[in-house]
Amino acid sequence: MEEKKETIQKNYTYILKCSDGTLYTGWTNDLTKRLKAHNDGRGARYTKTRRPVALAYYESFCSKEEAMRREYEIKHLTRKEKEKLIQNQKENPA
């Protein structure tokens, strides 16, 4: 009998730095694929005209709900607070 391995799907909340200097926050279960989609113009309407975009920050979660909740929280931060998150991750990588 074949044994099924349980895979834990990661979910991510991320911040992108757009070509015009603005920040975009979103969530995904595949960071690489989502970043490529944003840069190919198939991501969000917001980033479509602000390409290229670069990954500036991310957090990982076990559930989609946690990632979405964190996305909501980050979207309500000021730009200065978002920049502080980005800087802290650069200074203290996981």
Image (cartoon, rainbow, N blue to C red):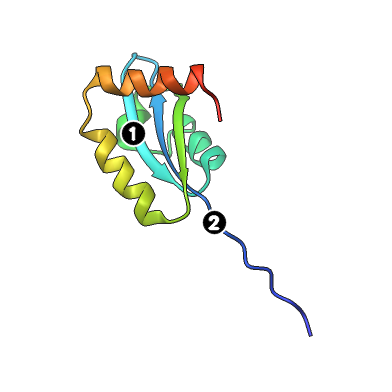
Question: Relative to the observer, which residue lies in front, 65 or 22?
Answer: 65
Disc 1 crowd rating (10 Å Cα; few below 14, some 14-19, many 20+) is some
Q: Amino acid at mark 2?
A: Gln
Residue 52 - label: none
Asked where in the image residue 21 lies, by quadrant, the reply is top left
Q: Position of residue 32 (x, y in %)?
A: 56, 38
Q: In the displayed structure, does residue 76 sit left or right of residue 65?
A: left
> How far apart, in angstroms, are the residues tagged by discs 2 and 1?
20 Å
Q: Which residue is label 2 attached to?
A: 9
| Foreground tag (2 vs 1) | 2
Classify the position of the C terminus by image quarter: top right
Q: Position of residue 54 (x, y in %)?
A: 47, 23
Whether 21 is drawn above or below 75: the answer is above
Task: Please give the name of the residue rendered at 32% of the width and 43% of the height, measured from the top-left corner.
Answer: 70
Q: Which residue is label 1 attached to?
A: 25
Task: Please give the name of the residue rendered at 77% of the width and 80% of the height, measured from the top-left corner.
Answer: 2
Asked where in the image residue 77 lies, by quadrant, the reply is top left
Task: Please give the name of the residue rendered at 41% of the width and 35% of the height, measured from the top-left corner.
Answer: 14
Q: Amino acid at mark 1?
A: Thr
For label 2, the SS is: loop
Q: Position of residue 46 (x, y in %)?
A: 30, 31
Q: In the displayed structure, does residue 47 sit left or right of residue 72?
A: right
